[in-house]
Image (spheres, rainbow, N blue to C red):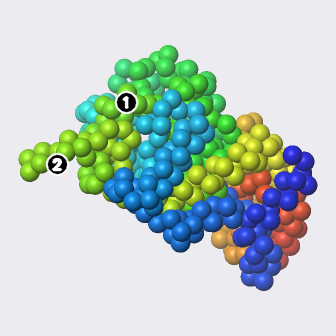
Amino acid sequence: MIVQEIENLRKDFPMLQKKMRGQPLVYFDNAATTLRPLAVTEALVRYYTEQTGTVHRALYEFAELATDAQHKTRQKLQEWIGAKSEKEIIFTSGTTASLNLLASSFGEAFIKEGDEIIISEIEHHSNFVPWQMLCNKKKAHLKIAPVLDSTELDLNALESLLNERTKLVSITHISNAFGTENPLEEIIRIIRRRSDAKIAIDGAQSVAHMKINVQKLDIDFYAFSAHKMYGPTGVGVLYGKEALLNDMPPYQGGGDMIDEVTLDYSTYNELPFKFEAGTPNIAGILGLGAAIDYLNKVGLDIIWAKEQELLAYAETRLNEIKNITLLGQAPQKGAILAFVIKGAHPLDIATLLDLRGIALRSGHLCVQPGLKRFNQTSVLRISFSFYNTFNEIDFFIQSLKEIIDSLY
Ligand SMILES: *Cc1c(COP(=O)(O)O)cnc(C)c1O
């Protein structure tokens, strides 16, 4: 697919035709949430207007359709991440919910007083706080693997933290703050060599941008959100190896997750339903199915290549700005750039960019410890999707220059 063809895809995204503050929208906040192609919202509307029915509870036609459609999405997801079985795909409400499910249930099954869990210094709060809470509850120890000045994980330091007490290592694939891509193959090799720890990967920033194969990489758990992969909000996935999930207790009790309920005890449903209590976000799940179809149509190779070009161009152009510091100089990166400008508060700059129709993220990015490592409490972040353009970057740089001139 050539550049022109990719830019033609912009017409699939109604939000890209919108104006913000009277200016054409320049959407550079794709790491927070991507926009959705019409095919995804059409799937949502179709569910609510033409084929409403619930899953697993009834035999009428529309209930069967919903059950079938949910099943199809699960199969698409299994294929998307290379899972062995669709039983390993658990629907949640998002990455945060997936990681909380994991911390609670894995913690219940496998974490005892004195055990150790390792995360990295630059994790999203969603991959930080649940482990902190679990370790407090279980009197276990949370070890923090440091990063180098480039924001890359310090692999030697990681290796030295591993021992027979390490029960789990949970790290991000791509940092939502700095874009750093962790070398999973190498990291997993080190962990397997030094310990029996299970490995959880936060895939929120990678799943829609690069090919992942959980079996080839030998990942134990992988978490992600639909809304960062062109799907609806309120849906996410936890992948887990079947044998591990079988050894973990349910997270929540309720409908669908049971086999038999008596006055004294209950037995639980098989995977994946054991972890899916209550009516799921059926419309959202169907929307996620449509998002995967769309991504398959565009192709991950093309998506990655285009986003890397945008990243390289934006990096070059940002270096023209005086007094700028780019945070995160890892050689392997997703299309995410965080930066600060000396003497100008990120929130002021974000407010003035908003007036020009430019949407970007400002603040702590849900990575307070990671920012602190680089002596920051608040930064600016731009993050790209394949539908962004070089012209948008030019307009953004021009605007940034004018805003900085007006502030000094
Ligand atoms: C967005 C994000 C999360 C949290 O995802 P939610 O959809 O808000 O639950 C976790 N980790 C990373 C790396 C993220 O980018």
Q: Residue at x 55, y 27 (%)?
A: 215
Q: Residue at x 63, y 66 (%)?
A: 42
Q: Residue at x 26, y 54 (%)?
A: 254
User: Where in the figure is residue 189, as x and y percent of width and height?
Assistant: 56, 20
Near-viewer residue (389 or 84): 84
Name the kind of residue labelled 2 in the image: Val
Which mark, residue 244? 1
Nearest-to-viewer mark from 1 and 2: 2
Q: Residue at x 36, y 38 (%)?
A: 271
Residue at far top of view: 193
As drawn, 304 above or below 396? above
Q: Quadrant of residue 381?
A: bottom right
User: Where in the figure is residue 38, as x and y percent of width and height?
Assistant: 69, 65
Residue that badge 2 annotates: 261
Near-viewer residue (108 or 257): 257
User: Where in the figure is residue 173, as x and y percent of width and height?
Assistant: 59, 39
* Residue 326 relative to residue 1: left or right: left
